[in-house]
Amino acid sequence: MDKKIELQVINITNSQAQVGAFAMLLGEVNGERQLPIIIGPAEAQATALYLKGIKTPRPLTHDLFMTSLTVMGASLLRVLIYKAKEGIFYSYIYLKKDDEITRIDARTSDAIALAVRADCPILIYNSILEQECLHMSDEKRTCSEDSDNDEEEQENPAPSNVTSISLEEELEKAIKAENYELAAKIRDQINVRNQNQ
């Protein structure tokens, strides 16, 4: 039987391959294989906002789904990426209510957006991961993460005359205006400023 491997979300960036799309990079937990998945802007935004701790004034679709599950007494157990064909990944979400487990077919991007909210495992069959993955040694990963952090600081520099309070105010305005892309950038600036203090 094909072994299941657990993945975690490492990064979400603009896709170099498709205009208007995003690339989500998943990494093997306790391993070095990485899996890039092309996702749409709505799913990228929903996952990135949640991972960055940005609260929206109104629930996004994935938040609504998780609240609905809770109200109905169900929980999300796990996500399984069960197939890859021509660059498209296919996933199941497993829900549990009482002693009954239900499997539902889902787009991988939606399944992952739900998994991060439920803090449940994202699994993939080893054969699929091996076929579709990128291999990255620990040394290269460390260098890559360092250079990513440098790039983020250059892309989102916090101006020296901007105070933390004004950044927080701008973040609040962006969230109220439902401009979540701007809110994510401001949150990055706040994080960079906090790390440098």
Image: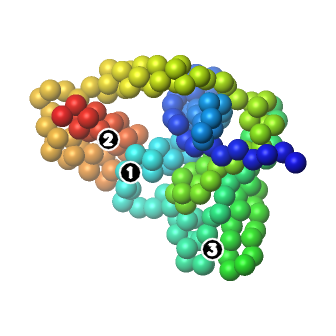
Q: Secondary structure at mark 1?
A: loop
Q: Residues within 10 Å of mark 1 (few under 14, many from 20)?
A: few
Q: Which residue is mark 3?
A: 74
Name the spot of residue 188 as percent of width and height, x first: 33, 36
Which residue in the protein does label 2 denote? 187
| Secondary element at image label 3 | strand
Q: Position of residue 73 (x, y in %)?
A: 60, 78
Circle count: 3
Q: Is residue 40 visible?
A: no
Seen in the image, is 140 located left or right of residue 149? Answer: right
The amino acid type, in three-letter code, at marker 1 is: Gly
- Badge 2: residue crowd in 10 Å (few <14, some 14–19, many ≥20): many
Q: Are marks 2 and 1 in contact (CB under 8 Å)?
A: yes
Marks 1 and 3, Cα distance to the nearest angstrom? Answer: 24 Å
Residue at image coords 38%, 51%: 53
Quadrant hosting residue 41: top right
Q: Would you call the spot at circle 3 few (<14 residues within 10 Å), some (14-19), or many (20 or more)?
A: some
- Quadrant position of residue 2: top right
Tags 1 and 3 in contact by the CB under 8 Å rule? Answer: no
Question: Residue 60, position in %: x, y?
Answer: 49, 57
* Image quarter of the C terminus: top left
- At a point 32% along the width and 20% down the height, the residue shown is 154
Q: Earlier in the sequence, mark 2 or mark 1?
A: 1
Q: Specify which label sits upstream in the sequence, 1 or 3.
A: 1
Earlier-in-chain disc, 2 versus 3: 3
> What residue is rendered at 62% in x and 35% in y?
31
> Which residue was labeled with disc 1?
53
Q: Position of residue 74 (x, y in %)?
A: 63, 74
Side (left or right) of 131 relative to 69: right
Would residue 36 appear left or right of 175 to someone viewing this image? right
